[in-house]
Amino acid sequence: MILEAAVKTRKGPDGGAVGSVLPTATHAGVKAGSKDRKAKSALVMEEIANERNLEIAFKNVAANKGAPGPDGKSIEEVRKHLPLMLPQLAKSLLNGTYQPGDIRRVWIPKSGGGQRGLGIPDVIDRIVQQATLQVMQPHYDPAFDGSSHGFRPGKSCHTAIAEAKSYVEAGYEWVVDIDLERFFDTVNHQRLLSTLERKVTDRRIIELINKMLKAQVVMPDGVVVANEEGTPQGGPLSPLLSNIVLDELDAKLRERGHKFVRYADDCNIYVRSEKAGKRVMESTTRFIEGRLRLKVNQAKSAVARTGERHFVGFRLESDLERDQVHVLLSKKSKQKIDDKIRELTPRNWGQSLNSCIKQVNVYLKGWAGFFKICTAEIERTLQALDAHIRRRLRAIQLKHWRRKRTIVRKLIQLGANPKTAWRSIYAGAKSLWKMSHTPVVDRTLRNALWARRGLLSLWNRWKELQPKANAQMLFAFGCA
């Protein structure tokens, strides 16, 4: 029966990450959640296996809309059998017979090149991980350092940038940018479990997490490999475990009096000079590699001006003349949106232009919501992106009209001067791409036309979001 199989042969979350994107008023150096803490349940297996906790866990897993794990069972398939499955699952957790299934490894491209491995457990294993997270997080998160922003309630990339910006404004214009090499794949299991044992006294929870960590990985070619180290990205519990590991780094940096911001495995330490930065890089690397048994990627780590480095999609550039710090797109983020626009507006688009605009808008709306905290200096970049999107859409429209004669006729219908249209379109051999930026096409398929068709303007959207974004940035660092 599917329920028995689910309990006995689950194999391994969706790709969703745990953590809120709401702002927080936590200052650097203050433990997050030191005020207004929620009531915590006991850190025992009975709380994890509580059927109500498991029901909530399923709802959270379902909301993340993950793909099936190695067993092929979708969220909807599990949902159908949930009332019968949860009691069996709870019983197996309490008596220790629960065995996680394998984890499906998928590779996704990284913005800076290369690939990042994600581990996708079965839906049932994601429920167990989420249920464990819901019980453990209230015990651990309040004790994490306020400068840790990744995958935490009330924290986000925006709160990380708000804190980093405050340091640059205070004169800490050099950054020690530390990149941990394959962090999620190299966490030492025994060291992590020993750290957990300091707070978790219920041995069943330790054994449960050990089983999760040791779950075998099914590679894309079907080969099954043992998992002797690491906390594979993709499971709901992985972000919390990674923060528990790196909390020791945060404590050391705080002890040394450093100004730092960490988002998951991205750690930036802000200093006043290059010389100080090199000294901090050396001492911090010794601690990470010696004490934490992790590896610093020397090729990707650097001591540099903040405007030269990428941090959670942004870069911080000091304007000495105006005594301001600008929040701008990083080079990686600019390249990523350029690539995405090309992907969404291919020259050979075969559907209606409205459907193309609709899918472009979906992406642009989410993108603008994330990068709304950029300062006004992003104006030219956004206007250039808007212009580029419109040109690509013009090229698609010309492609749909196909013949030059049809193009001229359509332009005239839209108000173009007939003589100008004939002369411009038939003047020499022009590709559709070159034709899309001729004066007559620009003027006829003008900005207002695309606005009427519903195309979102990044520049206009950014201006609309500014009041909320500014308030969020102020509140994020407790300045509201």
Image: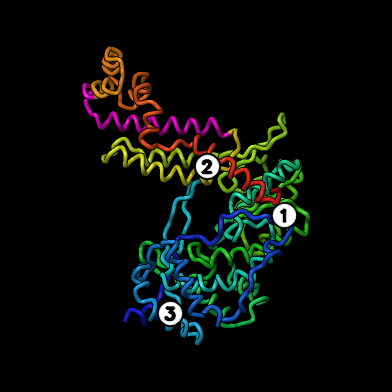
Q: Quick one: quadrant of the N terminus?
A: bottom left
- At which x and y percent is residue 96? 50, 85
Around disc 1, counting alpha carbons within 10 Å, would you say few (fewer than 14), some (14 to 19), or many (20 or more)?
Answer: some
Q: Is residue 289 above or below residue 355?
A: below
Q: Earlier in the sequence, mark 1 or mark 2?
A: 1
For image coordinates 63% across by 78% down, the residue present is 200
- At which x and y percent is residue 131? 51, 73
3D distance between C-alphas at marks 1 and 3: 41 Å
Amino acid type of the residue that numbered disc 1 sits on in the rendered structure: Ala
What's the mark number on residue 86?
3
Q: Is residue 400 above or below residue 81?
A: above
Around disc 2, counting alpha carbons within 10 Å, would you say few (fewer than 14), some (14 to 19), or many (20 or more)?
Answer: some
3D distance between C-alphas at marks 3 and 2: 44 Å
Q: Residue furthest bottom?
A: 95
Q: How many marks?
A: 3
Relative depth, front residue between 257 and 474? 474
User: Is any atom of residue 59 visible in this view?
Assistant: yes
> Which of pointers 1 and 3 indicates the residue nearer the eye?
3
For image coordinates 73% across by 60% down, the residue present is 252
Residue position for label 2: 332
For image coordinates 51% across by 80% down, the residue present is 49
- Residue 172 in magenta? no
3D distance between C-alphas at marks 1 and 2: 27 Å
Around disc 3, counting alpha carbons within 10 Å, would you say few (fewer than 14), some (14 to 19), or many (20 or more)?
Answer: many
Amino acid type of the residue that numbered disc 3 sits on in the rendered structure: Leu
Magenta-colored span: 378-406
Amino acid type of the residue that numbered disc 2 sits on in the rendered structure: Lys
Residue position for label 1: 28
- Disc 3 element: helix
Q: Main secondary structure of the magenta part?
A: helix
- At which x and y percent is residue 48? 54, 78
- Residue 389 in magenta? yes
